[in-house]
Image: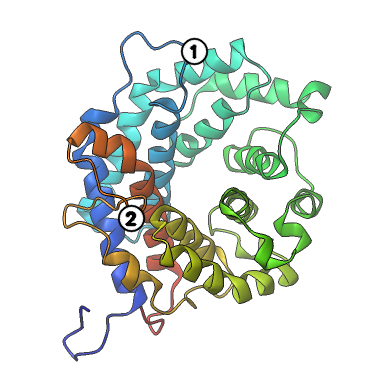
Amino acid sequence: MSTTSTGAPPPARQVAHLMAARALGWLHDNLGRAAVPPDTTAELADPDSVYKPLGESALAASLVLREGMASSDGRQAARDLLDFSWRQLGSGDLLYERQLRYPMLTDPMELYTHFARGGHRHERLERLIAHLGGLVSQRGAELLPNRRLAVANAARISGVGRRADWSALLDATWLGHTPEPWMIDWMTAYCMTHTVFHVTDWGARPEGLPPRVGDYLAAWLPVWMDIWLEIQEWDLVAELLIVDGCLPRPGRVPGVWERLAAAQRPDGLLPRDGQPVDENPDKAFRDHRHTAVVVTVAGTLASSRYDDAARA
């Protein structure tokens, strides 16, 4: 276990900050592996291959810039990551073409939000999103409850779209029911985390969680983390740490950051789980970049919102 100069374990905030810096550096070092193939069109036969990951990288970069807790090198790496991702999407043109061709899809708007937060705007896309948001078809779209929250938060951040009834949207989710905590499973856990992300705008609005939900999460997050730490689901543990960073009183998860840090490699790669990492650099990047994004976000929020007294 690492220690401070006094011999005590370092504060969770310090461990989280270092993990985020390493993960961001790893994402930056592998920018060339995130490029969109030259023949990519708005149809996106496999959106999860490069399109969605670019949006996730933009999310992490935009939050690093929003929180302002990184070093000057870290802020520059985040800016590089955001600008690179924007260029790969044709400076927004690919998002516009996809939204125009598939007006019922929400992913162009959701991805655009991260770039808008970082200062990149696309006028035609914003006009199109505003128009589509006024249609009855959009209001009746068949979306999971946490996806409706994602769309509502995207509209809130970008300033495009209608106002949302946040209480009603939250109440429709699994988390909004404050259900039996032992009924959570892997997929439900991911849905729950994203409910929190969108209601609080990734920690910017912790007051968006009603006290009954905040108390429920404060009670059960440590239990859920312990379960997924035990089976080495590092990606999900990092997602749960983002949830912790979104709470009104974050940083009450003793030992989790230290245990997660033990799984991170010196170059910043954090495996998604306890399985061996494929040492082919391209495969390793494809397999583990999502976890790097998640720990960058989690560590950034911890650096910004944890009390220095919160121990690892």
- If you read the primary sequence from the N terminus, does the residue marked by circle 1 or circle 2 appear first? 1
Q: Which mark is residue 193?
A: none
Q: Above or below — where is 284 with respect to 174?
A: above
For this rendering, which residue is in front, 291 or 232? 232
Quarter of the view holding residue 298: bottom left
Q: Which mark is residue 42?
A: 1
Which residue lies most toward the bottom here? 6
For this rendering, which residue is in front, 297 or 273? 273
- Left of 46 or right of it: where is 165? right
Residue 192 x %, y %: 62, 54
Which residue, given by chain and number where applicable, does mark 2 sit on?
274
Element on which disc 2 rests: loop
Estimate the spatial distance between the alpha carbons at disc 1 and disc 2, rounded to whole Å: 36 Å
Task: Report the label total.
Answer: 2
Residue 17 x %, y %: 30, 65
Residue 82 x %, y %: 35, 37
Element on which disc 1 rests: loop
Residue 20 x %, y %: 31, 58
Taking the image as drawn, is residue 135 in sight? no
Image quadrant where one finds the C terminus: bottom left
Quarter of the view holding residue 256: bottom left
For this rendering, which residue is in front, 78 or 42? 42
Asked if the residue at tag 2 contacts the one at tag 1, i.e. Cβ–Cβ closer than 8 Å, the answer is no
Depth check, mark 1 against mark 2: the one in front is 2
Taking the image as drawn, is residue 183 in sight? yes
The amino acid type of the residue labelled 2 equals Gly
Q: Residues within 10 Å of mark 2 (few under 14, many from 20)?
A: few
Q: Above or below — where is 164 with respect to 84?
A: below
